[in-house]
Amino acid sequence: MTRFVSLFLRRLTVVGDSMAPTYRDGDRLTALRRWRRVRVGDVVVVPDPRDPARPLLKRCVARAGRRLDLRGDNAAASTDSRDFGLVEETSVRWLIPRRQS
């Protein structure tokens, strides 16, 4: 990818089963730079609040002002807002486009 394109797109590989069955371990995704407010239902990429170098893929399940409740689709295998609390919307840098049917 050119440097210009990489400012707006990011390729990532899903690691783990926290977003199964929507996204499975090894799936390759393209994320788009966040250009709008995060909506309930959006899948986002956010730095892990416990280790900012580690990106997390989670779904926004609720908003509390500018703070987001992020959860994995597979609750049994997910570390999410139930563990680290609500996340500031400004932490979200990337959105995963909704799958087309």
Image (tube, helix red, strand yellow):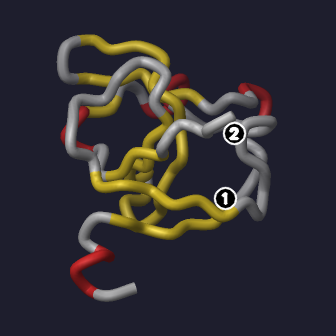
Up-down relation of residue 48 to residue 4 (above or below)? above
- Picture quarter containing residue 37? top left
| Upstream in sequence: badge 1 or badge 2 | 1
Residue 79, image x and y in percent?
61, 38
Q: Residue at x 21, y 44 (%)?
A: 35
Dots 1, 2 in contact, CB < 8 A: yes
Q: Quadrant of the N terminus?
A: bottom left
- Picture quarter containing residue 84? top left
Label 2 secondary element: loop
Q: Is residue 24 left or right of residue 95?
A: right
Question: Which residue is at the front of the view, 99 or 93?
Answer: 99
Counting every numbered tag in the picture gives 2
Q: Which residue is mark 2?
A: 19
Q: Residue at x 77, y 38 (%)?
A: 20
Question: Which residue is at the front of the view, 29 or 17?
Answer: 29
Up-down relation of residue 47 to residue 85 (above or below)? below
Residue 32, image x and y in percent?
37, 55
Up-down relation of residue 49 to residue 64 (above or below)? below
Which amino acid type is marked by label 2?
A: Met
Question: Which residue is at the front of the view, 100 or 92?
Answer: 100
Up-down relation of residue 63 to residue 20 (above or below)? above
Residue 54, image x and y in percent?
47, 63
Q: Which residue is mark 1?
A: 14
- Picture quarter containing residue 9? bottom left
Q: Is residue 76 left or right of residue 41?
A: right
Q: Quadrant of the C terminus?
A: top right
Which amino acid type is marked by label 1?
A: Val
